[in-house]
Amino acid sequence: MDFVTVRELRAESGKVWEKIEAGEEMIITRNGKPFALLVGTDSASLEDNLLALRRAKFSRLLAEQHKRAVELGLDKMAMEEIDAEIDAVRKERRDRAAGRR
C-alpha cells in the first residue's frame, strides 16, 4: 500500500491510476495525515466492495462504542436503568418539540 499526497495525486495522476489498475491500494494524505483510501473496482464487484467497506466501518464503530461503554461502566446497567434512560430522552425530545424546556 502506497501513500500519495493530494498534490502528488493532482500532478502525477497517471502514475496513481496505473498502480490502482495493477491492483495496488493508495492512501491519499492531506497535511501529512491519511485522508482517503483509493482502491480499484469494476462494475461487477462495485456493490460487493461497497458493502464490505461499510460493514468494516460499522464493525469498527461498534467496537469503539462497546469499548466506551465498558470504560464508562454502562455495560453493567440493568434493563430497568436502560429503559429509564430511553424514557427520559424521549420525554426531553417531546418537551423540546412542544416548545418547553
Image (cartoon, grey):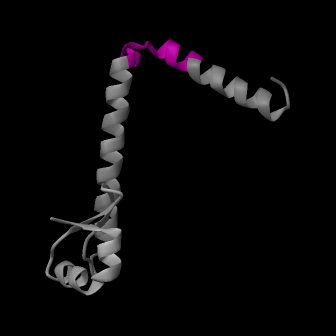
Count of number-bearing discs: 0
Relative to 14, is 72 on the left or the right? right
Q: Is the magenta stretch mostly helix, strand or loop?
A: helix
Q: Where is residue 37 in the image (x, y as percent from the top left)?
A: 29, 64
Instruction: Residue at 34%, 19% (x, y): give it.
Output: 71
**Residue 22: within the magenta?**
no
Query: In which quadrant of the rendered view does residue 20 lie?
Result: bottom left
**Which quadrant would the C terminus be assigned to in this image?**
top right
Determine the residue located farthest toward the right in the rendered image. 99
Q: Position of residue 8 (x, y in %)?
A: 29, 74
Can I make out residue 43 in this image? no
Q: Position of residue 85 (x, y in %)?
A: 57, 19
Query: In which quadrant of the rendered view does residue 91 lie?
Result: top right
Residue 68 vs 76, above or below: the answer is below
Q: Position of residue 11 (x, y in %)?
A: 32, 81
Residue 97 vs 48, above or below: the answer is above
Query: In which quadrant of the rendered view does residue 12 lie?
Result: bottom left
The residue stretch that appears in magenta: 72-84
**Which quadrant would the N terminus be assigned to in this image?**
bottom left
Q: Which of 26 and 51 is in front in this view?
A: 26
Residue 13 vs 91, above or below: the answer is below
Q: Nearer the viewer, residue 38 or 58?
A: 38
Instruction: Residue at 50%, 19% (x, y): give it.
Output: 82
Instruction: Residue at 38%, 23% (x, y): give it.
Output: 69
Can I make out residue 9 in this image? yes
Instruction: Residue at 31%, 45% (x, y): give it.
Output: 59
